[in-house]
Image: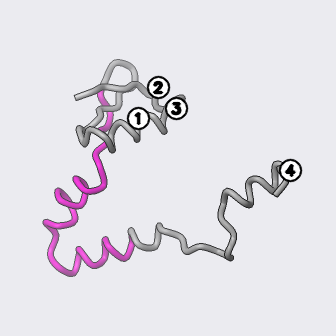
Amino acid sequence: MKIVNALQIRKNLGKVLQELEETGEPILLSKGRKVRAALITFEEFQRRFIDRQPEEAQEKWRNALGELRAPRVGTRSSLDTLRELRGYPD
């Protein structure tokens, strides 16, 4: 298991998340030489916490997690919008 400190997380969150996705191994987060939290994959979170709940609680969690996934607004991709904001030609 890898231990990553808070500064590394702030600077390299994308890399840490990519490593988590690739290896599937939990990553421990430390601050001040003390482990404060652990990152686990979403699948592991579901298996350990959501799937063990009664059916009613599972549905509540699924609805809450579904609300976090915002629907697409409009027909343009975020990349097209970003290119326009930065002034890149089409």
State the residue position of label 3: 10
Quarter of the picture containing the C terminus is: bottom right
In depth, the one of 82 and 51 nearer the eye is 82
SS label for mark 2 = helix
- Quick one: which residue is furthest to the top in this view? 33
Q: Distance between the residues labelled 2 and 4?
A: 32 Å
Q: How far apart are marks 1 and 4 (CA)?
A: 31 Å
Q: Does the magenta stretch include residue 41?
A: yes
SS label for mark 3 = helix
State the residue position of label 2: 8
Q: How far apart are marks 2 and 3 (CA)?
A: 5 Å
Query: Percent position (x, y) of residue 59?
Result: 27, 79
For marks 3 and 1, give the one nearer the viewer.
1
Query: Percent position (x, y) of residue 19?
Result: 35, 36
Rate crowding at label 2 as few (under 14), some (14 to 19) or many (20 or more) other CA atoms within 10 Å.
Answer: few
Q: Sequence-wise, which precedes: disc 1 or disc 2? A: 2
The residue depicted at 54 percent of the width and 29 percent of the height is 11
| Residue 16 - label | 1
Amino acid tagged 1: Val
Decide if residue 6 is on the left or right side of residue 28: right
State if disc 3 and disc 2 touch (CB < 8 Å): yes
Quadrant in which residue 25 is drawn: top left
Decide if residue 56 is on the left or right side of residue 63: left
Amino acid tagged 4: Gly
| Residue 63 - label | none
